[in-house]
Each structure stands twice: as structure tokens, then as C-alpha cells.
Image (tube, rainbow, N blue to C red):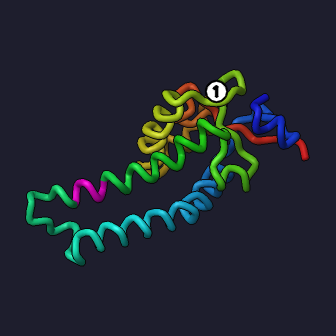
Amino acid sequence: MTAAAAMEGRRPSGTSARFGRRFAALLYDAIVILAPLIFFTWAAVWIAGGRALLRDSVGGIGAGLYHSGLFAIVAGYFVINWVHSGQTVGMRAWRLHAVDPRGRRMTWRAAISRFFWAIVAWAPAALGVLWLYVDSEGLALQDRMSDTRIVRLTGP
């Protein structure tokens, strides 16, 4: 049992979360992360003096930095939440928890690996996530490749 689950009186069930809950949590997280992305975009446009970021006269360096910043915000949101509490805001709402195979909190390395594999899994029409329906343990691609799990929480 993870520390966060113990504090809330909930336990990871060991049951791999299905596609519907994962997708719903991702939608919640998209709404939550929209605010920092908008603020970052506003700051980038302000710093650029109102110029279009994609038409940078210095060989696209500004656009590259902007896109790298967006990526860092999204990656940071997921990785930091998975490492510190095992849950993002969307995962809390849908009673999901990210753990290692023993039900413990993820390491930084595992969380970063999970994030990159999640991009691969969700990108082609969520085929890597839908893989959980044919996997013998009900694991999605990012679960299998990063040796982590998304499980449903049981209890009050």
C-alpha cells in the first residue's frame, strides 16, 4: 500500500484500470493543465513582443524553445504527480493510482519512462492503451514498457 493511499484509507486493488477510467482521467488532466499552458503562451508572446512565435527570424530557435517549454510543462505535471503522490488531479477524481508492480510509489526513472511510453501508446488512436484488452494482465503499452501500473483504488 502506498503512503498516499494509506493516508486516505484507500488501497490499490491490484486491478488494472480500464480504458474508460484512464481516458476520463486524462480529460480531467487536460482541463487542469490548460491554465499553465495558456499562461506560458501568454508569457512567451509577451516576451516575443507580440510576434508570431512560429515565424522566428533566428532560424526557428524561438519556436523550438516555446514548444520545448510546452512539453516540459506537460511532462512535469504528470511525472511530478506520479512520483510524489501517485495521482494526478484526474486520477484522484477517477480513483486511480500509479504504482510499481509491488504497489509502491514510482521512482523518477519509472515515471519518466512511463510518460514517454504513454506518448507512444496514446498517439496512434490510443492503440497502445487499448492493448490492455488483449494483454494477459490487463496492462497497456506504457504499463508494460515502464514496469508500472495504473490501478483502481478500493475503500471509502
Is 125 or 66 nearer to us in this picture?
A: 66
Residue 8 placed where, x, y %?
A: 84, 43
Asked if 18 appears above or below 64 in the picture, the reply is above
Residue 23 visible in image: yes
Q: Please tell me which residue is depicted at 44% across the width and 64% down the height of the picture.
A: 37
Left or right of 63, for residue 88: right
Residue 100 placed where, x, y %?
A: 64, 26
Is 131 or 38 nearer to us in this picture?
A: 38
Q: Which residue is mark 1?
A: 100
Q: Please tell me which residue is depicted at 30% across the width and 73% down the height of the picture.
A: 46
Q: Which span of residues is magenta-colored?
A: 63-67
Tag 1 secondary structure? loop
Amino acid type for the residue under numbered disc 1: Asp
Left or right of 72, for residue 131: right
Q: Please tell me which residue is depicted at 78% across the width and 35% down the height of the picture.
A: 12
Left or right of 76, for residue 1: right
Is 51 or 95 nearer to us in this picture?
A: 51
Asked if 55 appears above or below 27 in the picture, the reply is below
Quarter holding the N terminus is: top right
Classified by dominant secondary structure, the portion drawn in magenta counts as helix
Residue 16 placed where, x, y %?
A: 70, 36
Circle 1 crowding by C-alpha within 10 Å: few under 14, some 14–19, many from 20: some
Residue 7 painted magenta: no
Residue 27 placed where, x, y %?
A: 58, 60
